[in-house]
Image (tube, grey):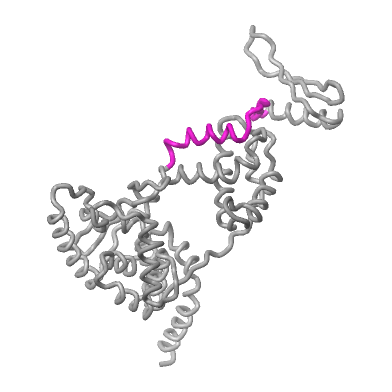
Amino acid sequence: MTGHVRRRGRKWCVVVDLPHAEGQPRRQKWHSGFATKRSAEAALTEILSRLQKGDYVEPSRQTLGAFLEEYLQAARTTLRPATWEGYRASLAAYVVPTLGATPLQHVTPAALTSMYADLLANGRANRPGGLSARTVRMTHSIVRKALSEAVRWGYLARNPADLATPPRQQPPEMHTWSADELRAFLEHVEGDRYYVAYLLAATTGLRRGELLGLRWRDVDLDGGRVSVTQSLLTINNRMVFSPPKTATSRRSVTLDAHTLAALREHRKAALAERLSFGADWPDHDLVFTAPDGEPVHPRRFSAYYFAQHVRAAGLPMIRFHDLRHTHATLALQAGVHPKVVSERLGHSSIAVTMDRYSHVMPAMEAEAAEKVAAVLFG
């Protein structure tokens, strides 16, 4: 394989001979825009080396924005709808406005790192201020995954996102209630339409979407268990049912006697409501519904119904998702093995549980020290 450098105007170019079948016309590729002969010669050496190793990528004017459109179209068949929509929204809001017009092959680690810094400082679309480090890191993960496909498709020789520097991950802010506060909340909402949903979240740690997507066919009242087989999500403000995101999210959770009894009573009330509504009742088989039998909008459920009850009860304000954290914290404090807690929450591994709830560990360790000492010294 051969090549040479050539001057064109005030710039230098690299010209290389590309592989071609015997009897076919000679193929050459020009690489333009080098300021000096030395830089062009260095580029020629690298290009010839890549041709020899088989990872040479022909120059292209395709922009990053055009590539991301192509990537998203291909990813529709491999990503869950909610995940795909999240990717599309993040790329459209944070990446395309900044680097979308940049040629794909000119995207550098430095350009990506600069974009992340700008998003941290000025990334909010509707008001002054920047995005959280978590959001920027998530954007970085999406870009990195997309550009890895560009490498696999032969558009790039290497992934610039691999060498970019996203912001450091900040520990997620977590607020939980004490057992007394959780008990006060449940006493306050007893009799509410969604009391059993709040109770189930508190005693099982189910996520919001898992609760609102729960069907009666997934509830074993005789065996005292609920199975997580789908979630209710919102995509473009439209409610959709989706299978669990991971294999560990698809799980079966044992119910305590109090929660099971409440579910039985809720079942009776739900059947009576359905009968009184008549033949027009939607056949979703959902455990928790709006008064007309339709699914409960997830954001309205947590940001309006739940938040309203918390304020009325005079309790410290937490997110609905923090009921899940409260369940896990109370379980660990009660001495439940972290492996059991991990399985009930649907975490991918016990390491995730231990890392997320490390704030509970010092107290557990102190208790363990006292128990060992009691065995040794009486």
Residue 233: give x, y in percent of width and height.
37, 50
Q: Nearer the viewer, residue 329 or 139?
A: 139
Residue at point 33% right, 47% down?
241
Residue nearest the observer in this picture, 65 or 7: 65
Task: Give percent across and percent down for residue 363.
Answer: 47, 80
Seen at 26% across and 65% down, the residue is 193
Taking depth in this image into account, of 334 and 204 the one nearest to the observer is 204
Instruction: Classify the position of the C terminus by image quarter.
Output: bottom left
Q: Is residue 104 left or right of residue 293?
A: right
Q: Which image quadrant is residue 14 in?
A: top right
Q: Residue at x 36, y 62 (%)?
A: 343
> Which residue corresponds to the image point at 26% horizontal and 58% vertical from the top-left?
288
Vertical arrangement, residue 276 with respect to residue 307, above or below: above
For residue 262, side relative to residue 126 (left or right): left
Residue at the farthest top position: 23
- The answer to which of 130 and 200 lies nearer the viewer is 130
- Vertical arrangement, residue 28 with respect to residue 309, above or below: above
Locate residue 123, reporting x and y percent. 61, 52
Res. 199 in view: yes
Rendered image quadrant of residue 201: bottom left
Write down the region rendered in magenta.
53-79
Is 312 situated left or right of 109 in this image?
left
Task: Answer above or below: position of 122 versus 196.
Answer: above
Residue 67 occupies quadrant: top right
Is 66 covered by the magenta stretch?
yes
